[in-house]
Image (cartoon, grey):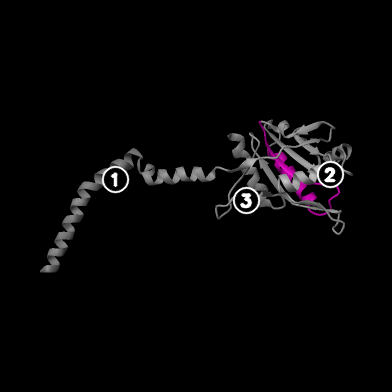
Amino acid sequence: MFKNKSYIGISFIILVFGIYAIPKIISRIQNGDVVQADRLDNVATASKKDEKLVEIGPAPKFELVNQNNEKITNESYKGKVYVLEFFFTTCPSICPKMNQSMLLIEKKFFGNPNFGIASITIDPNHDTSKVLKEHAELLGVKSANWNFLTGDRDYIFGLANKEFNLYAAANDKVAGGFEHSGLFALIDKEGNIRCRKDNFGNPILYYDGLEKKGVRDIQQDISMLLEE
């Protein structure tokens, strides 16, 4: 007898809930409001916030000479999104791969006047403007906004190590006589270093120019910055 009363009570509660709730659910489905629930709206908003790239701070100022013997500074890139690297033309190890990665980036954004590349040599005694021009031609560089830069060696090492914190050094014990980072810096239109976060929510700071994932990531983030 007690069990029967319990079943009756439960059935009554379900009936009341159905009478109250089902018409509202049907109405929301018909109006397309189900996918716009507050909880889903909050998730979508949070997702957009998470996609925003981290602003690390202003990129260091620089003044160097390009492959056409023209003075190029950070101000030359004002209003442009650009990628910056340190390399040298006679590098027998990672530079060829970095060159190919940068060519992929150039190709994707070729013709966009708001995008540029800065490749700074760490062997300026050898890499004169003339040598850099020949190197650019050998690579098949087409973009007028890709500058290969040279200058005073101590100045460039200071720019790499102290300003950008992208390692570069002379080392007679390694092939080519120099060692350096294979990372790319991404700078926005306002001259700020920007980056995405890793899987733990930490800024990656720079992008790996030696891996497909790093190239793919920086291409995606360049696109985002160009739209800002």
Which numbered mark, 1 or 2, is in the foreground of this view? 2
**Residue under pointer 2:** 153
Mark 3: give few (<14), some (14-19) or many (20+) Cα within 10 Å: some
Quarter occupied by the C terminus: top right
Residue that badge 3 annotates: 204
In three-dimensional space, the C-alpha distance between marks 3 and 2, rounded to whole angstroms, equals 28 Å
> Magenta stretch containing residue 146, yes or no?
no
Kindly indicate the quadrant of the structure image that contains residue 7: bottom left
Lower position in the chain sequence, tag 1 or tag 2: 1
Tell me which amino acid carries mark 3.
Ile
> Residue at horizontal 65%, vertical 45%?
218
Q: Give the range drawn in magenta.
A: 79-108
Q: Earlier in the sequence, mark 3 or mark 2?
A: 2
The residue positioned 24% from the left and 47% from the top of the image is 21
For discs 1 and 3, the disc positioned in front in the rendered view: 3
Q: Which of 164 and 212 is in front in this view?
A: 164
Residue 109 pos. (x, y %): 68, 37
Crowding around mark 2 (Cα neighbors within 10 Å: few <14, some 14 to 19, many 20+) is some
Q: In which quarter of the image is residue 27?
A: top left
